Image (cartoon, helix red, strand yellow):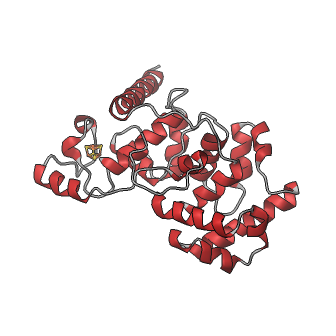
Amino acid sequence: MARLDSHARSVRRISRIADSLEDQLGRPRPPRKKSPPLNTLIATLLSQNTNDRNSYRAWLSLRKQFPSWERVHKAPWQTIAKAIEVGGLKNQKAQRIKLILQTILKQRGSFSLDFLKQMSDEQVMEYLLAMKGVGSKTAACVLVFSLGRDVFPVDTHIHRICNRLAMVKTKSADETFEAMKLLLPPGRGYSFHVNLIHFGRQTCRSNNPLCGQCVFFDECVYPQKHRDPLRTASSNQQNRTTDFLITEKIASGSSKLRNHSGR
Ligand code: SF4
C-alpha cells in the first residue's frame, strides 16, 4: 500500500513538473507531417555525440550528395564518411548507416521502414534495438517522431535532469527510459521530451546550470546547485546554443539552418 502511494506521488509530481515546463515553454505538438521512419533513424544516429546543428549539417550534406538511400547503400563507407564528417565520429557512423541499409534491404527487399507502422511499440523497439549502433533513445525517437507514438525518449541530457530533479534515481539513460515508462502520465511523452531538451539547453545545462533562474530550485537534489548571481550572469553570456531538434527539423522538411527557439 505504502509502495502504491509512493508511486502515485511520483506520478503526480512528474505531471506537475511537466505542467510547469509547459507554462514556461509552451506545449509542443508533434509535427503533423511525419518523416519516414528510416529518415528519423539515420538522422538520430547522426545526432549521437554531437549537437543538433552539426548533425543537421551532416544530414543535409548526406542528402545532397546521395538523393536516395539506394545511392547511400551503393557507396563505399569512406565516401559516406566524407559526406557526414561535420557531425563527428564519421567512420563509425558511416559504417553503421551502411550496415543498417544492408540489413533492411536483406530483410525487407527495399529501403523502407514503413512496415514498422503496423507493429506495437514493443515490437518496434525490439526490431530497431537489434541493429548495431541503435540504442533505446534512437529507437524511441523513431516511435515518437515518425510513428506518432506516446513514448518518452531519454538522452544523456534528459537523464541528467530527471536525476537532478529526483524524478528517478538511475545510473544511465537506458535505466531512466525504463523507469520513466512507469511514471510519466499518458499523453505527455512528446511534450515532456521536447521541453526537457530545451530546458536542458537553456537552464539546466550539464556545466554551469543557471540555477538562479530555475523554478525547480527548491526541489532540486543536485549537490552543486547554486544561487550565485555572478555565476548565473557569466553563464548566461555563454548561452549561445542552437535550439532546435534535428528530429523536428527533418519532419518539417526545412533546409534552413538558423538559430530559433523551436516555439
Ligand atoms: S536548480 Fe540548477 S541543477 Fe537544479 S534543476 Fe534547476 S538548473 Fe538544474
x%, y% of residue 107?
86, 57
Vertical comparison of 72 with 168: above or below? below
Vertical comparison of 227 with 109: above or below? above
* Rendering quarter of residue 261: top left
Is any part of residue 169 visible from this angle?
Answer: no
Q: Is residue 240 left or right of residue 218?
A: right
x%, y% of residue 54?
48, 64
Report the quarter where the C terminus lies. top left
x%, y% of residue 237?
21, 57
Q: Quadrant of ligand 1?
A: top left
Q: Identify the residue at image location x=28%, y=43%.
A: 221
Q: Identify the residue at image location x=77%, y=68%.
A: 71
Q: Identify the residue at image location x=77%, y=45%.
A: 114
Is any part of residue 24 visible from this angle?
Answer: yes
Looking at the image, which residue sits at the far right? 109
Residue toward you, 211 or 59:
59
Q: Is residue 120 left or right of residue 145?
A: right
Residue toward you, 12 or 88:
88
Vertical comparison of 76 with 48: above or below? below
x%, y% of residue 240?
31, 57
Q: Is residue 37 left or right of residue 231?
A: right
Q: Is residue 46 left or right of residue 114?
A: left
Residue toward you, 130 or 233:
233
Q: How many marks?
A: 0
